[in-house]
Amino acid sequence: MLTTFQMILGALSGSLVGFSLGLVGGGGSILAVPLMVYLVGIKNPHVAIGTSALAVAANAAIGLINHARQRTVVWRCGLMYAAAGIAGAFAGSTAGKAFDGQRLLFLFAIVMVVVGILMLRGRRNVGVEGAACDRTNAPKVLSFGLGTGLFSGFFGIGGGFLIVPGLVASTGMAMINAVGTSLVAVTAFGLTTALNYAGSGLIDWTLAAVFVAGGIVGSLAGTRAAKRLSTGGHLTSVFAALIFLVAAYMLWKSAAAIF
């Protein structure tokens, strides 16, 4: 049973997650999992992963509404990407539940570092104006969606930090559009993973509700900030810096538990 103080920490953590989702389309479970484990104090990493997946799916849906109002969502691309990744997310989450929790967090952090390096290398790429999904790039979009879904489910994350670079690589769209569009898939992947974990009793429903409540406020602020940072590669740099910061902390904590 969570204490009142833990509930407050959960709400504050949710606001940070919501802000990150609105700002860069990612950071949901990448932030939520370590916050639940190391700040709120959830002892079981699998419960933290399952609970964060549900909370992130809800917060991503809120962020999606905010980005849709800003007209930064390319709906066809988002739906294609999400559809291809749902099966992968289910298969990946099934494998993830059977994997040692601390080793899962350690591998998760390594993946984050690789993604951050790739994003920084391409931060000067402004993207193609009006990029869309059609027959010419559909196979690439679908394959990236499937692969991202597998990673997302395995690591128990909404997948934004993988979906955003996947959308940029497969469609060439601008970063601000990739952020908004990614939330379609983040919502779908997170919900798929959460349902799988819920079937095994690995979700703290009260904590998830508190996270979502905090995330509503954070998401509004994050979406506005994303619009201001969308030029000159600044948004990509913020995206990568956040990845490296959280990855370093997770490597330190999980390595100590493993070794």
Image (tube, grey):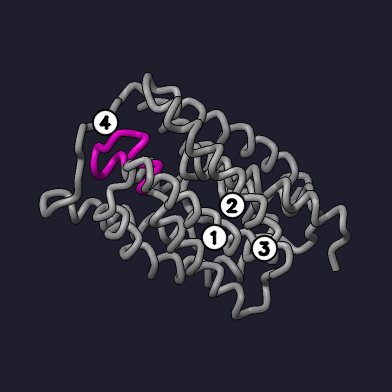
Give the Cα distance between marks 4 and 1: 28 Å
Q: Is residue 22 visible?
A: yes
Q: Is residue 197 above or below residue 43?
A: below
Nearest to N terminus: mark 3 or mark 1: 1
Give the Cα distance between marks 2 and 3: 12 Å
Q: Is mark 2 on a helix, strand or loop?
A: helix
Q: Is mark 1 on a helix, strand or loop?
A: helix
Point out the frontmost of discs 2 and 3: 3
Disc 4 vs disc 1: Cβ atoms closer than 8 Å?
Answer: no
- Percent position of residue 241, x then y: 55, 28
Give the Cα distance between marks 1 and 2: 12 Å
- Type of amino acid at the residue the image marks with label 1: Ala
- Type of amino acid at the residue the image marks with label 2: Ser
Nearest to N terminus: mark 4 or mark 2: 2
Toward the bottom, the furthest residue is: 199
Point out the frontmost of discs 4 and 3: 3
- Percent position of residue 133, x then y: 19, 50
The residue singled out by tag 2 in the image is 29
Residue 125 within the segment the image draws in magenta: no
The stretch in magenta equals: 168-181
Q: Is residue 50 above or below residue 184?
A: below
Toward the front, the furthest residue is: 69
The answer to whether 79 appears left or right of 246 in the picture is left
Q: Is mark 3 on a helix, strand or loop?
A: helix
The residue singled out by tag 3 in the image is 208
